[in-house]
Amino acid sequence: MCGRNVAFYVLILYGPTYLREVLHFDVKGTGWAAALPFVSCAIVKFASGQLTDRLTMFSEKTKFITCTLISMVGLAAGFVVMSMTSSRTIAQISYTFAVTLSGITIMGTIKCLQLRCQQHVHFATAVIAFMACVWQFVVPLGVGYLCPNNTPEEWSFLFFIVSVTA
């Protein structure tokens, strides 16, 4: 869970910086390139929720594990490709892919949490929210340390590290 939080916060907090400084999008292009993946993330999140509710032939455990696995592999694959490519198009597709599949995390983790913790879900959700806040403070320190000059090599190293933790 922590690795996925780190990966998601790198995307949400520093995705526009990566698009602007490394992929050399103009300001308008950076805005669109950074925003549209999160729109697709919301659509996938909504669709996956509907789909998991309608797939009654599978157990809840199977659905949660599948959603979590898709999210984890998608995030890691997106970061691996971004770390290895120098192509602007492939990097943008990988960025979009990683952001979009990160939306499925909610189906695999939070929905499972509601069923497993039942009346104690408020405490478990509070712990997850607290950890998300912690990562929002830690991620900028890590990015600032690993990518001080915003070079493609620095970002490749950061993405490789994030892909290993995701």
Image (tube, rainbow, N blue to C red):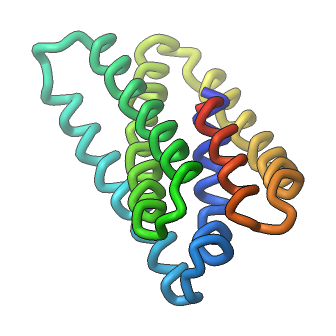
Q: Position of residue 81 (x, y in %)?
A: 48, 48
Going by the picture, which residue comes out furthest to the left? Answer: 57
63 left or right, relative to 125: left
Q: Position of residue 101 (x, y in %)?
A: 39, 44
How many numbered tags mark residues here? 0
Q: Position of residue 157 (x, y in %)?
A: 71, 47
Q: Residue at 64%, 41% (x, y): give it.
A: 160
Q: Position of residue 55 (x, y in %)?
A: 14, 24
Q: Residue at 38%, 38% (x, y): give it.
A: 104
161 left or right, relative to 58: right
User: Which quadrant of the rendered structure holds the N terminus?
Assistant: top right
Q: As rendered, which of 80 and 75 lies closer to the eye?
A: 80
Q: Residue at 70%, 27% (x, y): give it.
A: 127
Q: As rendered, which of 112 and 97 lies closer to the eye?
A: 97
Up-down relation of residue 152 to residue 46 (above or below): below
Q: As rendered, which of 8 and 106 lies closer to the eye?
A: 8
Up-down relation of residue 166 to residue 114 (above or below): below
57 left or right, relative to 131: left
